[in-house]
Amino acid sequence: MPIRIKARAGESAEQLMRRFKKMCEKEGLTKDIKRNMYYEKPSEKKQRALRKSVKRTQQLEMIRMGIMPPRGPMRPGGRPGTGPKTGGGGGRGGPNRGAGGPPRTGGFGRPR
């Protein structure tokens, strides 16, 4: 889908470019361009997907065991939710913004 941006009244070129970059990032265009910058063999793609899958399952196990707190409300499939609609991820500020509590750790005593 093409990304179209119209200049708003009184908007500078820098603001327009910032808005354009943000939209490209939301669409995943910058990530896709970086991934396609170099040829990746099919076997390397499979290995990368496998590593990602293993990491995801390990994180879910750590959440289930109570070692690591969930990132957001749980989805029906048992996976933690992310994004602005479910309350996880997104937005500015760190994990303690507005919480007023001690810093959250990744489960091994190290702050995230």
Image (cartoon, grey):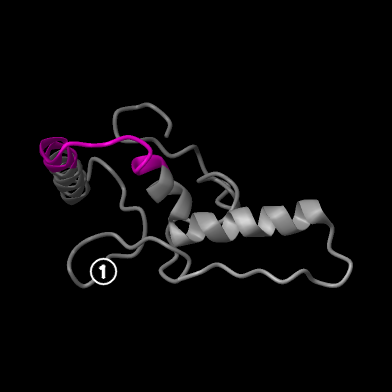
Which of 106 and 51 lies nearest the eye of the viewer? 51
**In the image, residue 97 lies at what x, y percent?**
59, 49
The residue depicted at 55 percent of the width and 44 percent of the height is 94
In this figure, which residue is indicated by the disc labeled 1? 75
Characterize the magenta stretch by its predominant secondary structure: helix
Q: Which residues are magenta?
A: 34-48
- Compared across the picture, whether 95 is left or right of 72 comes to right
Residue 79 versus residue 44 in the image, above or below: below
The residue depicted at 17 percent of the width and 68 percent of the height is 77
Residue 4 versus residue 105 in the image, above or below: below
- Compared across the picture, whether 44 is left or right of 22 comes to left
Task: Say which quarter of the image contains residue 45.
Answer: top left
Amino acid type of the residue that numbered disc 1 sits on in the rendered structure? Arg
- Compared across the picture, whether 107 is left or right of 98 comes to left
Residue, far right: 10
The residue depicted at 38 percent of the width and 38 percent of the height is 37
The residue depicted at 77 percent of the width and 69 percent of the height is 7
**In the image, residue 21 lies at what x, y percent?**
60, 53
Residue 86 versus residue 106 in the image, above or below: below
Q: Is residue 17 magenta?
A: no
Task: Say which quarter of the image contains residue 34.
Answer: top left
**In the image, residue 89 lies at what x, y percent?**
45, 55
Q: Quadrant of the C terminus?
A: top left
SS state under label 1: loop
